[in-house]
Structure formats: C-alpha cells, structure tokens
Amino acid sequence: MPSKASGRSVSAGIVGRLRSALASGRALTYGELAREAGCTERTVRNYLDLAEPALGTAITRERGPDRVVRVRAAGSDDQTTIEALASNLAAQMLRTLFPVAGTSFERPARGSRAQVVVSARGAYRYSERQLRALRAWLRAADERPRVTVRFAYQSFSSGPGERIVWPLGIVVRDLARVYLIGVPAEADDGRDVRSYALERVVVPKRGSAVTVLRGEEAGSPPRAIDRAVVEHAIDLPFSMYPPDTPGSVMVRVRFSAEQAPYVVGRLWHRNQRFKKLRGGGVELTLGPAERTETEAWVRQWGEAVTATMTGAKENNRW
C-alpha cells in the first residue's frame, strides 16, 4: 500500500505544476491555475502572494474586459518582450537626438536582455535648452482649450523674427532632425500646417525659448484646426513640404541594373510604383512631390539614373 504523501511533498508538487503552467506564457484565471496545479483557488492565491520566492518568478495580475482576473509570469510572454524591445528602441532613438544626461530617455526598458543600438549618420545633437523648448512645445500642443506659443526663429528665407503659432505636435525625420509642427496665428484655416526646425529656434541662456499664450492673449484659433492632421499636411517620408504646393511634380526615374537592388523594397514616397525593366533595371514613378526636394533626391543617384518630371512648365532630364 503506497504511503500517504507528506505535506512538504504535496507543496513541492503544487509549486512545480504552478511553475509549469505559468511558464507557458498564457494568461490564466485562478480557476485554470487551480485545475493545472490540482489544488483549490485559495491555495493558488496563497502561493501567488509568495510568487517570487516560491515560484522563482514575478507575476502580473490583469483584469480583462470581462472583469475576470488573469495571471501571467512577468516577462514570459513574447508580447512583453516585444514591448520591452520597442520601448528600448524608442529610448535609444531619442538618446541619439538628445544626448542629455539625467533625462527620462536614458532609463533602460525592463523585461528584455536584448541589446539595442541605434546609429544615425548626420543626426543633429540637440542641447538641454533645445530639449526644454521641445517639452514646452509638446505640453502646449496637449492643452485644451488650445493655446498659442511665441518664440524667436531663424529662417533661411526671411531671416530672424518672432513667430506666434498654434502647436499641433512634432515630426522626427530620418532620425536626424526634429521639426515643431503648428498652424501660424495669421492663418485663416487649420490646414495651413507649417514646420519649424528645432535647431533654428532661438534658445536663450536664461528664460524660456517658448512662451505660452492663453485665453484672450492667445486669440481665436483658425477654423478646422481640430481636424488638422500633421501627416496629411506633410509629404512624409519624402518631404517636409505639402505635396500640393505650387510647382509640385510627378517624377519617373529609371535606375540601372547596378542601382536597382538599392531602390526596390524601400519606401520613398507614399504614392510610388515600381516597374521592372529589361536588363535588370527598374522604373520608379512617384508624386506629386515638391520640386526642389525631388531634384535633390534624383541628383544623389548620379549618372546611374534618368528622370522625367511632369507637372511643371517643362520636363527636365538628368
């Protein structure tokens, strides 16, 4: 006749079965864990209260839409690892732009041992004062009722001057530059979205670079500003200029067989089409796009391409 198991061995068996159930990575209810471990729900709750020393792992409890509590081992789920990696990636990307000690961007993401390194050639390295200006802009963009901000700006076209803008958000382009996005106070329509390069904002050694104006001082926002969508107003990823600006063009570029592998499989424009050519080359059609940036983009390929632009007064070839 087999001997009766001792309380110590029963406890060890429960611990082992609970550990195995949690190791699956699934979110389990107390009832499901009790069935897996062969014990009562009360016993499960008691063991989970001592999860780290008893099971050798931390656990999380989540109440779902059905109001049922489910338990999973912290970090056991692939999704947890992916989220930790994504958080780490975001932090590393921001640190590349803002190498400022003591910011929240330097906190490493927990839950993943994978190493994440982000490198960006030619990325602008913003200062602590520029970071403060960025934070002030984002806080102002988040305020409701809406506010305007006043700041000094160095423009290449019109020179230095003061700007008063209704902030919407920011754009980080090519992991190299940060743009502050908003609608100028003099605009009649909220769709008149403009971009302001962060490095051209004048940041004084003392005081704030961005001054918030509220209430009567802010004035009335332009119509339809609440329907303004930054991504609709900027031709990302191709250009920071709207695709419907005067002089915008459609472009057809033919790449040689040697250049084709470096072109196919990449996102150049939201409206792009590829066509294979005899001999291994490829034809890329995109647009509408801002003419100046289109010309600069085509010229970077050198003699390996021929390009035709339509939509301007005349066609151009390189």
Image (tube, rainbow, N blue to C red):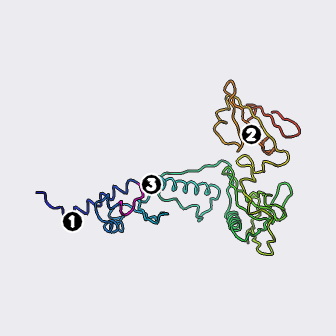
Answer with left or right where residue 48 lies relative to residue 300: left
Helix, strand or loop at label 3? It is loop
Residue 105 spot, x, y in % from top left: 59, 61
In this rendering, the answer to whether 119 lies above or below 255 is below
Residue at 86% from the left image edge and 57% from the top image edge: 158
Pick whichever of labels 1 and 2 is earlier in the sequence.
1
Residue located beneath label 3 in the image: 77
Give, as a three-letter code, the residue at label 1: Gly
Q: Residues within 10 Å of mark 2 (few under 14, many from 20)?
A: many
Q: Is residue 26 magenta?
A: yes
Percent position of residue 280, x then y = 66, 26
Amino acid on which the number 2 mark rests in the picture: Leu
Give the quarter of the image for residue 42.
bottom left
Figure quadrant of the N terminus: bottom left
| Residue highlighted by disc 2 | 286
Mark closest to the chain's N terminus, 2 or 3: 3
Using the image, determine if residue 223 lies above or below residue 233.
below
Verify whether residue 45 appears in magenta. Answer: no
> How much space separates mark 1 and mark 3, taking CA atoms?
32 Å
Q: Are marks 1 and 3 in contact (CB under 8 Å)?
A: no
Can residue 65 be spotted in the picture? yes
Under circle 2, the secondary element is: strand
Q: Range of the magenta residues?
A: 25-32
Q: Residue at x 46, y 66 (%)?
A: 67
| Left or right: where 220 falls relative to 48 | right
At 51% from the left edge and 53% from the top edge, which residue is drawn?
Answer: 82
Which numbered circle lies on residue 7?
Answer: 1
Q: Amino acid at mark 3?
A: Asp
Residue 86 % position (x, y): 55, 54
Q: Mark 2 and mark 3 in contact? Answer it, CB < 8 Å.
A: no
